[in-house]
């Protein structure tokens, strides 16, 4: 060892270290997401420090205030002109603040608020040991049927952690359709998925099915996100950047600076095609389109019904938002390659969902397959690749999410001794026993079927019109056929409810608290208003239909 | 060594992981295969980062590690609760909802 080596353990810097620029964060433009994340963190602190008896009220208060405040922030941004006259790219290029992002964020926040009401419902089950109970397990870690579970129920435990979990999931959903680089897309996907995996496992009744649904959702969901991540890796390898705008420029060949490494990779179409294929596959999984739909019926059936409603409505809105942005902003230069693929996916999704739904005997599975076929209808609008395509998809998502969350809220009301009576045979004659509940459910089913004067008709009309003008007439024909098939099983449920004899030991309809009444009421109101007078909302979606790049 | 070789290795690892997810029965092993796929992605990110001479890929690798860790927390909790109520972690046994 030389002498100099001993004395070279440290050295002084030659000059002052160059300053690292702090990232610039536009807090005002990011306010909706930040409010929801902040409230979720506050919810965790409430779990830690507030006495057990008052946690439920504290959590419900914090969550509803946060969702309303975040919605107000979205409205304020829109009133400020974001989305219509200007658009921003915030947080160092990570998040876009434009029309589609704000429109979808507003939709997600409102459906999450409705979902929150169904989460907080505590009047459906009779009181247990003098405590009101909600739809969630007393203690998720206790083994179903064990002494530990009985003790937890007797002590009146409730899983109030569902509220912060809901807020975290909503935060992920808010970022997902606004993500403007691939890393943000991936992180948002995980932030929205991980709380949902947990929420699926938390049912109070039928816990084995609930846990099974959670395992299936978790394993398949992470499998799909691994594919999405590999797709991101290949796209990064192709373009040397994560930003949507830069990758789109590399795809178009209009990028200004080309370094030698980029010259090597940007000629490699395998990286681009395989990468975007894997990326779109991961998104189609979240959307629930047909080759990747296998998880949907099991997870929708097994999860607690309020969670199913939230997943079916808000997750689908967020996932379609992300898919739209990826196809329209990241890969517009590749549309001659992805359009045929999406054509095929849309056709099998519309027909597959509608045909398999006919054979279902469980109302939640039926609604799951109906959700799959609706994903196909929305994909028809996505394929249009026109401004009308964007705005019709936005409108459809807003209309559809309220119908869905309302329908699942009605499902929570029809109960027998074992909890919710989801088997279709038990719904026979419901219209004679509880005409109001059956009538409300009929309105939702008619909206799913796309009967005029409901929001479903306005949405389907807008999407099919955009698809036809975008040159996809055969797709519209298939869509109309699929709608006719789907109308058959929706009408069948209505006939079952109103024109068959009620069974003597049939289910009862629980009288809910004002929370669920508000949820169902909002669902009906939006369904009817968007159906009777869709013009204002179509214009709103039309004004919001431009992506920023 | 040519960084492209690391890409081949990443693709190979990813394929091994995906095959494992499809053919293994134990939920824990399936989950480990998913982790292998995520790590294969990490290797690809780092290799591409080296090829392009920018640091984006290495930063993403860190994010992926954090996400994978969060996924382990959530996933093990779900799998352990399933195991405790059924005394089996086989994904073939979880078939209560099959039609």
Image: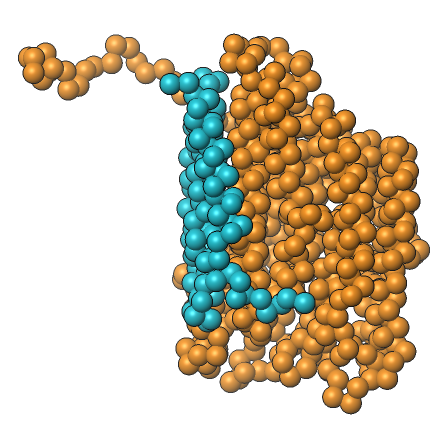
Give the drawing colour for chain B.
Answer: cyan
Give the drawing colour for chain A.
Answer: orange
The answer to whether A133 is drawn above or below residue A333 in the figure is: below
| x then y, percent, for residue A275 | 60, 31
The answer to whether A360 is drawn above or below residue A132 in the figure is: above
The answer to whether A14 is drawn above or below residue A193 in the figure is: above
Task: Depth check: give the residue in front, A303 or A35.
Answer: A303
Residue A9 picture quarter: top left
The answer to whether A460 is drawn above or below residue A496 in the figure is: above
| x then y, percent, for residue A434 | 81, 79
Residue A110 seen in the current view: yes
Q: Is residue A71 left or right of residue A199?
A: right
Task: Depth check: give the residue in front, A479 or A94.
Answer: A479
| x then y, percent, for residue A505 | 74, 88
User: What residue is shown at x 90% (from left), y 49% (from top)?
Assistant: A480
User: What residue is shown at x 91% (from left), y 44% (from top)?
Assistant: A477
| x then y, percent, for residue B68 | 44, 44
Rendered-image quadrant of the N terminus of chain B: top left
User: What residue is shown at x 67% (from left), y 75% (from top)?
Assistant: A420
Q: Is residue A491 left or right of residue A69?
A: right
Residue A395 picture quarter: top right
Rendered-image quadrant of the C terminus of chain B: bottom right
User: What residue is shown at x 86% (from left), y 69% (from top)?
Assistant: A492
Q: Is residue A365 left or right of residue B17?
A: right
Number of numbered callouts drawn: 0
């Amino acid at each position: 060892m030389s002498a100099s080596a001993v004395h070279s353990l440290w050295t002084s810097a030659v000059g002052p270290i160059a300053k690292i620029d702090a990232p610039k964060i536009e807090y005002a433009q990011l306010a909706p997401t930040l409010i929801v994340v902040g409230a979720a963190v506050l919810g965790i602190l409430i779990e830690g420090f507030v006495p057990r008896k008052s946690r439920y009220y504290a959590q419900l208060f914090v969550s509803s205030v946060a969702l309303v405040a975040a919605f107000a922030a979205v409205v304020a941004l829109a009133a400020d002109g974001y989305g219509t006259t200007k658009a921003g790219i915030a947080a160092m290029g990570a998040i876009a603040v434009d029309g589609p992002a704000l429109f979808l964020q507003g939709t997600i926040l409102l459906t999450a608020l409705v979902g929150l009401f169904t989460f907080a419902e505590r009047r459906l089950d009779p009181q247990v040991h003098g405590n009101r109970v909600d739809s969630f397990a007393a203690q998720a870690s206790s083994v179903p049927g064990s002494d530990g579970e009985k003790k937890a129920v007797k002590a009146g435990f409730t899983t109030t952690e569902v509220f912060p979990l809901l807020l975290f999931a909503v935060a992920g959903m808010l970022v997902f359709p606004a993500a403007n680089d691939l890393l943000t897309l991936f992180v948002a996907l995980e932030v929205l998925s991980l709380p949902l995996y947990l929420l699926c496992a938390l049912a109070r009744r039928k816990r084995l099915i609930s846990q099974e649904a959670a395992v299936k959702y978790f394993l398949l969901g992470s499998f799909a996100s691994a594919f999405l991540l590999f797709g991101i890796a290949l796209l990064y390898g192709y373009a040397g950047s994560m930003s949507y705008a830069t990758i789109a420029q590399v795809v178009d060949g209009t990028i200004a600076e080309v370094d030698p490494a980029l010259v090597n990779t940007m000629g490699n179409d395998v990286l681009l095609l395989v990468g975007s294929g894997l990326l779109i596959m991961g998104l189609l999984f979240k959307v629930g389109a047909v080759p990747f739909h296998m998880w949907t019926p099991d997870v929708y059936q097994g999860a607690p019904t309020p969670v199913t409603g939230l997943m079916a409505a808000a997750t689908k809105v967020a996932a379609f938002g992300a898919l739209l942005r990826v196809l329209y902003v990241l890969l517009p230069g590749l549309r001659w390659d992805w359009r045929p693929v999406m054509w095929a996916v849309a056709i099998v999704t519309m027909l597959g969902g509608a045909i398999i739904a006919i054979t279902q005997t469980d109302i939640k599975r039926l609604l799951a397959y109906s959700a799959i076929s609706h994903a196909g209808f929305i994909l028809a609008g996505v394929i249009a690749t026109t401004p009308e395509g964007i705005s019709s998809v936005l409108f459809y998502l807003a209309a559809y999410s309220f119908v869905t969350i309302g329908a699942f809220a009605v499902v929570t009301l029809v109960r027998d001794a074992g909890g919710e009576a989801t088997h279709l045979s038990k719904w026979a004659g419901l219209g004679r026993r509880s005409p109001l509940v059956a009538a409300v459910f009929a309105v939702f089913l008619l909206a799913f079927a796309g009967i005029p004067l409901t929001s479903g008709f306005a949405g389907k009309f807008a999407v099919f019109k955009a698809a036809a003008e975008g040159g996809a007439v055969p797709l519209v024909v298939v869509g109309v056929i699929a709608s006719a098939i789907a109308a058959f099983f929706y009408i069948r449920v209505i006939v079952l409810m109103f024109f068959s004899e009620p069974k003597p030991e049939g289910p009862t309809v629980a009288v809910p608290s004002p929370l669920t009444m508000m949820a169902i009421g909002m669902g009906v109101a939006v369904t009817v208003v968007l159906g009777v007078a869709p013009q204002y909302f179509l214009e709103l979606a039309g004004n919001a239909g431009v992506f920023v790049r | 060594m040519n960084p492209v070789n690391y890409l081949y290795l990443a693709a190979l690892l990813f394929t091994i992981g995906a095959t494992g997810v499809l053919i293994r029965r134990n939920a824990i092993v399936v989950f480990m295969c998913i982790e292998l796929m995520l790590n294969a992605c990490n290797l690809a990110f780092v290799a591409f980062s080296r090829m392009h001479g920018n640091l984006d890929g290495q930063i993403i690798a860190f994010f992926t590690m954090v996400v994978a860790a969060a996924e382990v927390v959530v996933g093990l909790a779900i799998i352990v609760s399933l195991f405790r109520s059924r005394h089996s972690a086989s994904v073939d046994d979880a078939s209560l909802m099959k039609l």
